[in-house]
Image (cartoon, grey):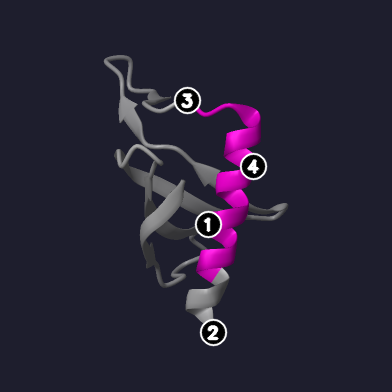
Amino acid sequence: MKIVRMNPLEKKDGGKMAAFFDVQTPDEITIKGFRLVDSVNGFFISPPSEKGKDGKYYDSVILPKEMRSTLEKMAVDEYNKMQK
């Protein structure tokens, strides 16, 4: 798995969103719309989501726990490289 695009965002008005990024699987499937969020407890990733009829947002990609941590580390490393 690799990050194929990362768009860092400018921090404005206390916003927590740090970047948007896309991921490509080993089978060359690209999943667009991941978000890197900077919280008080550090960075975490948020998968793409869709708004349901009830007004709540639901993840459209479900990641296993170990894959989520690997992807989170990759995203934070890539983000930090781009900030230098």
- Disc 2 or 4, which lies upstream in sequence? 4
Q: Position of residue 59 (x, y in %)?
A: 42, 27
- Mark 2 → mark 1, Cα distance in angstroms: 15 Å
Q: Secondary structure at mark 2?
A: loop
Q: Earlier in the sequence, mark 4 or mark 1?
A: 4
Is residue 40 visible to the viewer in this orientation of the structure?
yes
Write down the residue under mark 3.
62
User: Pointer 2 and pointer 1: residues touching (CB < 8 Å)?
Assistant: no
Amino acid on which disc 2 is placed? Lys
Q: Which residues are magenta?
A: 63-79
Task: Name the residue at 46% across, 46% down.
Answer: 1
Residue position for label 1: 75
Other residues around mark 4 within 10 Å, as few (<14) / some (14–19) / many (≥20): some
Residue 55 within the segment the image draws in magenta: no
CA separation in Å, label 4 and label 3 = 13 Å
Viewer-proximal residue among 73 and 13 = 73
Looking at the image, which residue sits at the far bottom? 84
Give yes or no for contact between labels 4 and 1 (Cβ–Cβ under 8 Å).
no
x, y percent for residue 44: 60, 48
Q: Residue at x 31, y 28 (%)?
A: 50
The residue carrying pointer 3 sits among few (fewer than 14), some (14 to 19) or many (20 or more) residues within 10 Å by Cα, namely few
Q: Is residue 68 left or right of residue 42?
A: left
- Label 4 near label 2: C-beta < 8 Å? no
Q: Height in image: 10 above or below 34?
A: below
Residue 70 covered by magenta stretch: yes
Q: Which mark is residue 84?
A: 2
Q: Which sits in the foreground, 3 or 14?
A: 3
Mark found first going from the N terminus, 3 or 2: 3
Q: Secondary structure at mark 1?
A: helix
* Relative horizontal placement of residue 7, taking residue 71 as reference (left or right): left
Amino acid type, callout 3:
Ile
Q: Amino acid at mark 4?
A: Ser
